[in-house]
């Protein structure tokens, strides 16, 4: 009667609706949605909303889901694998219709995503992609961005170029390394493993990585850093060191976040990774998966967005 079913007479409907109004009755939306087999809820798990890249991404996703009349549940893993696993479990318990996720930098085991697969909850990864097969993802072409970054520094006269990379667990770290090596090989320069140092992306980890690099025999005159935050940490520490080994060091980073415009001595260039575009395409893929249950289960979306090196004209 409350939903105006045609099998119920108008008089009966009016009586029932009158009683419902008198009792201040409110329908249980959760029960109704459960009956329909959907919750019209999307989950998003991101490493850190404080990072400009992810705050831009979540803004796009939120606007998109709002237009689709979906509710958004936002969570942060704070780059912790254990927390990420708990959040995935909570998303499952909330019966989200789908999940968008950028994995934590410490995540090395991916069994928790298999759990979602068993419960037929579609998952789309973006930006930080796990190194596993048969997944839906949207990512930026980091390898070509790395080649462009090294080429740019070579054109500026540098011949000893270091790389402060991220954790080995991140696929993006191996992509940066691959591009770095290919750029050197393309320019007929010898690859020196000592010029690549991994770090945990924290300020203290970056300091150690920088000190390790400038203590090598090659003594780099330029450094490619994992992202703009690592670049900021490295630049600050290089200024604090006041050593001849770090004088006139030039940096190129990734993400091209607004922060570099406020740095007095920022990176000379940064690789744009288009967070808004990645987020939009990831959301598009997820809604397509949600709305097309009869699609080929062995066909996976693998969307690659080209990166772009943006010189800093400060």
Image (cartoon, rainbow, N blue to C red):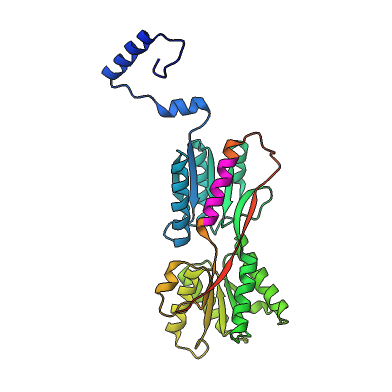
Report the front residue among 144 and 73.
144
Q: Let me know if residue 79 is in the magenta part.
A: no
Q: Can residue 196 be seen in this view?
A: no
Taking the view exactly as shown, the residue that stands out farthest to the bottom is 244
Q: Is residue 255 visible?
A: yes
Tell me the chief SS of the magenta region.
helix
Compared to 178, does 300 lie above or below?
A: above
Compared to 88, does 16 lie above or below?
A: above
Q: Is residue 10 left or right of residue 198?
A: left
Quarter of the picture containing the C terminus is bottom left
Q: In this view, does 154 lie to the left or right of 72?
A: right
**Image quarter of residue 152:** bottom right
- Number of labelled discs? 0
Q: Let me know if residue 287 is in the magenta part.
A: yes
Residue 77 pos. (x, y %): 48, 53
Quarter of the picture containing the N terminus is top left
Residue 27 pos. (x, y %): 37, 24
Compared to 287, does 304 lie above or below?
A: below
Residue 287 pos. (x, y %): 55, 41
Q: Is residue 162 left or right of residue 228?
A: right
Compared to 163, does 5 lie above or below?
A: above
Magenta segment: 277-288
Residue 180 pos. (x, y %): 65, 73
**Image quarter of residue 179:** bottom right
Q: Residue at x 42, y 69 (%)?
A: 259
């Amino acid at each position: 009667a409350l939903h105006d079913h045609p099998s119920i007479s108008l008089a009966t409907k009016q009586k029932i609706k009158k009683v419902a109004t008198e009792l201040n009755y409110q329908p249980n939306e959760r029960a109704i949605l459960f009956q329909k087999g959907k919750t019209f809820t999307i989950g998003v798990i991101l490493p850190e909303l404080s990072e400009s890249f992810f705050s831009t991404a979540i803004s796009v996703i939120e606007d998109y889901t709002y237009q689709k009349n979906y509710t958004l549940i936002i969570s942060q893993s704070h780059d912790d694998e254990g927390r990420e696993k708990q959040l995935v479990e909570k998303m499952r318990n909330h019966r989200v219709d789908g999940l968008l996720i950028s994995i934590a930098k410490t995540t090395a085991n991916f069994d928790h995503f298999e759990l979602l697969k068993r419960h037929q909850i579609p998952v789309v990864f973006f930006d930080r992609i796990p190194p596993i097969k048969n997944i839906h993802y949207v990512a930026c072409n980091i390898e070509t961005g790395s080649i462009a970054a090294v080429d740019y520094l070579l054109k500026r006269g540098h011949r000893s170029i270091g790389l402060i990379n991220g954790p080995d667990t991140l696929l993006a770290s191996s992509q940066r390394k691959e591009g770095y090596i290919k750029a050197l090989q393309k320019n007929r320069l010898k690859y020196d493993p000592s010029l690549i140092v991994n770090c945990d992306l924290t300020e203290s980890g970056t300091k150690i990585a920088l000190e390790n690099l400038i203590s090598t025999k090659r003594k780099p005159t330029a450094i490619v850093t994992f992202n703009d935050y690592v670049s900021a940490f490295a630049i600050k520490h290089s200024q604090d060191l006041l050593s001849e080994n770090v004088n006139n060091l030039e940096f190129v980073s990734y993400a091209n976040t607004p922060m570099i415009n406020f740095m007095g001595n920022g990176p000379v260039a940064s690789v744009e990774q288009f967070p808004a575009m990645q987020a939009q395409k990831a959301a598009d893929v997820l809604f397509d998966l949600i709305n097309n249950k009869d699609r080929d289960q062995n066909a996976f979306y693998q969307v690659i967005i080209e990166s772009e090196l943006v010189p800093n004209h400060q």
